[in-house]
C-alpha cells in the first residue's frame, strides 16, 4: 500500500471518521441476544472519498438520507478487515489513536469459534462489554 494513501486515509478518519465497537443483534445465541463488532466508517455529502476508501481498503459504501437532511454516502468496514485497516493507518493517526488501538486489541481477542458448540465464557463476554463501554467513552468525551 502506498504510504501517501495510508496518510490520507488516516487524515480522513481523524477528521470525518468513526472508529468504534458496535453492539449487533445476535442470531446464534438465545441467552445473549447481541454481540459486538469493531467498525470504521466515514460519512460524506458526496461519494468520491467513500468510494476511494472502498476501492483501496475494502468494505462497502451505501447512501442514506436522514430526515430533513441531504444524502450521505457512508463507507464502512468491520471485523478483521477493520483491524487490518486500523493497523495500517495507526502510525499516521493524530486524534483517534486510542480508539484504533482499542479496536485492534478487541479484534485480536476474538477467537474463531463455532458458537453453537463453543460459546464465549462469562469472562470473555465481560471483557467485550467493558471494552465497548470504554470505546463509547473515548468517542463521547472529546477524543473522537
Image: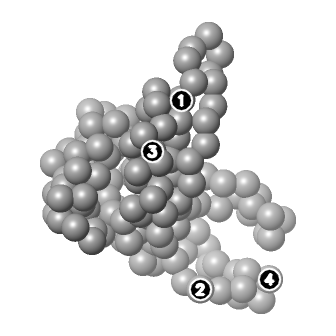
Look at discs 2 and 4 and give the one toward the viewer.
2
Label 2 to label 3: alpha-carbon separation: 30 Å
Binning the other alpha carbons within 10 Å of mark 2 as few (below 14), some (14 to 19) or many (20 upward) gives few
- First in sequence: mark 4 vs mark 3: 3
Q: Where does residue 77 sit, x and y in percent of width and height?
A: 51, 58
* Residue 10 badge: none
Which residue is depicted at the point 62% across and 22% down? 66
**Which residue carries the number 1 mark?**
72
Look at discs 2 and 3 and give the one toward the viewer.
3
* 112 versus 19 height, above or below: below
Q: Where does residue 114 sit, x and y in percent of width and height?
A: 72, 86
* Residue 50 badge: 3
Name the secondary structure under disc 1: strand
Is the image coloured rainbow, by chain, by secondary structure, or in one colour? one colour
Binning the other alpha carbons within 10 Å of mark 3 as few (below 14), some (14 to 19) or many (20 upward) gives many
Which residue is depicted at the point 63% across and 24% down? 65
* 106 versus 95 height, above or below: below
Name the secondary structure under disc 3: helix
Name the secondary structure under disc 2: loop
- First in sequence: mark 1 vs mark 3: 3
- First in sequence: mark 4 vs mark 1: 1
Which residue is depicted at the point 56% across and 48% down? 61
**Which residue carries the number 2 mark?**
112
Q: Which residue lies furthest to the right in this view?
A: 30
Q: Which of 110 and 94 is in front in this view?
A: 94
Look at discs 4 and 1 and give the one toward the viewer.
1
**Which residue carries the number 4 mark?**
116
Q: Where does residue 116 sit, x and y in percent of width and height?
A: 80, 83
Amino acid at each position: 500500500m502506498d504510504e501517501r494513501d495510508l496518510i490520507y486515509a488516516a487524515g480522513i478518519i481523524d477528521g470525518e471518521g468513526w472508529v468504534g465497537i458496535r453492539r449487533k443483534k445476535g442470531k446464534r445465541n438465545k441467552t445473549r441476544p447481541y454481540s459486538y463488532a469493531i467498525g470504521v466508517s466515514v460519512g460524506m455529502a458526496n461519494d468520491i472519498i467513500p468510494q476511494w476508501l472502498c476501492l483501496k481498503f475494502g468494505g462497502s459504501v451505501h447512501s442514506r438520507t436522514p430526515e430533513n437532511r441531504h444524502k450521505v454516502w457512508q463507507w464502512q468496514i468491520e471485523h478483521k478487515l477493520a483491524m487490518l485497516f486500523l493497523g495500517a493507518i495507526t502510525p499516521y493517526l493524530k486524534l483517534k489513536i486510542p480508539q484504533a488501538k482499542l479496536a485492534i486489541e478487541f479484534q485480536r481477542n476474538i477467537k474463531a469459534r463455532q458458537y453453537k458448540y463453543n460459546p464465549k465464557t462469562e469472562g470473555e463476554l465481560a471483557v467485550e462489554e467493558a471494552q465497548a463501554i470504554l470505546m463509547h467513552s473515548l468517542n463521547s468525551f472529546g477524543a473522537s
